[in-house]
Image (cartoon, rainbow, N blue to C red):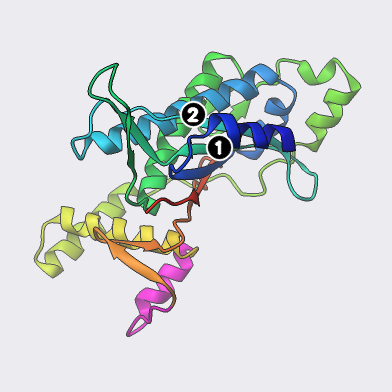
Amino acid sequence: MAQTAANLVDHVLPPSVALRQFVLTVPFELRARLAYDSELLGGVSRELATAVQDFYRRRFEQVGVRGGKTGSVTVVQRSNSDLRLNPHYHQIALDGVYTAEDDEAIPEFHPLAYLTSEDVADLLQLARVRILRFLKRQGAIVETRPLEVSDAGLANGEEGLQQLAAAGVPSPFPEPQPVDVRGIEAAIIRAADHLDVAPRRVRATLRDITAAVATAGGTLDDLVRAAQEDSLLFDGDERSRGGQIVASNGSSSTWSRRTGFCVSSSVIVAVN
């Protein structure tokens, strides 16, 4: 492990470049299947890497930086800190993109200015769709809603695989109830009428609020309690960028309770 880390630092990762770590956790139902199927384990890693690269490329295209290229290194950790089976992915990514005028020019690195919880949520959605599509093509899952995994009889062949399958703890969360989308839409329209603004303004404000709650590590219950307070007090080192509240340490995480996927992000090397 130490030799691998030294090789990455000395020969793979470029010096004086911003780096960011992404951690992907998969649903409980998938963990045993990935643990004893190396091809699926590697395939999910590739889909994650592609999703991250696409995210950076699109993000920089929005500000006029086209043709950007980036890269990453992913390591699979097979257990939790308490040694329970939990294959998950630690990815070190260049926190930005390289561009060059032509093949002879020296590439120029463009660091990402900041990353919000909403950005991480977008990345989670991009990665989740790619991963589920890959797993369905490989026959590893039968349905995505609710998630139904096919073990293809692999766990029945060897005693060790049976033990791995048994260690895959099922999700402790109940099946999600259908969401009353029309009721939510009606509430948004009522709020827009009350405030005399367009409904899109209300949706944009809701996105900003939920992003701030997620960055603070809060829940929907915390948001409801905060909405019932007469005033909000902000402590700690936080700053606002583009209407988003961003933690100063650059860390953020997004978890989808409906799908069981989670992506967290943290700055490893920041370059001013």
Number of other residues with Cα within 10 Å of mark 2, as a class: few under 14, some 14 to 19, many 20 or more: many
- Give the amino acid type for the residue marked by disc 2 in the picture: Ala
- Give the amino acid type for the residue marked by disc 1 in the picture: Gln
Identify the residue shown where x is 86% and y is 30%: 163
Identify the residue shown where x is 80% and y is 37%: 167
| Circle 2 residue | 49
Residue ranking furthest to the bottom: 230
Look at the numbered discs 1 and 2 and tell me whether their residues touch, using CB distance below 8 Å: yes
| Circle 1 residue | 91
Please name whichever residue, 42 or 40, is drawn nearer the observer in this view of the structure.
42
Coordinates of residue 82 in the picture (x, y in percent): 79, 50
As for residue 223 lying within the magenta part, the answer is yes
Which quarter of the picture shows residue 103?
Answer: top left
Q: Earlier in the sequence, mark 1 or mark 2?
A: 2
The answer to whether one can see residue 153 in this image is yes
Q: Which mark is residue 259?
A: none
Number of other residues with Cα within 10 Å of mark 1, as a class: few under 14, some 14 to 19, many 20 or more: many
Please name whichever residue, 163 or 104, is drawn nearer the observer in this view of the structure.
104
For this view, does 77 lie left or right of residue 93?
right
**Where does the C terminus fall, quadrant-wise?**
bottom left
For this view, does 270 lie left or right of residue 11?
left
Coordinates of residue 198 in the picture (x, y in percent): 11, 57
As for residue 243 lying within the magenta part, the answer is no
Coordinates of residue 220 in the picture (x, y in percent): 45, 63
Label 1, label 2: how far apart the Cα atoms are: 8 Å
Residue 204's place in the image compared with 91, above or below, is below
**Where does the N terminus fall, quadrant-wise?**
top right
Which quarter of the picture shows residue 97?
Answer: top left
Coordinates of residue 268 in the picture (x, y in percent): 52, 49
Which stretch appears magenta? 219-235
Residue 49's place in the image compared with 210, above or below, is above
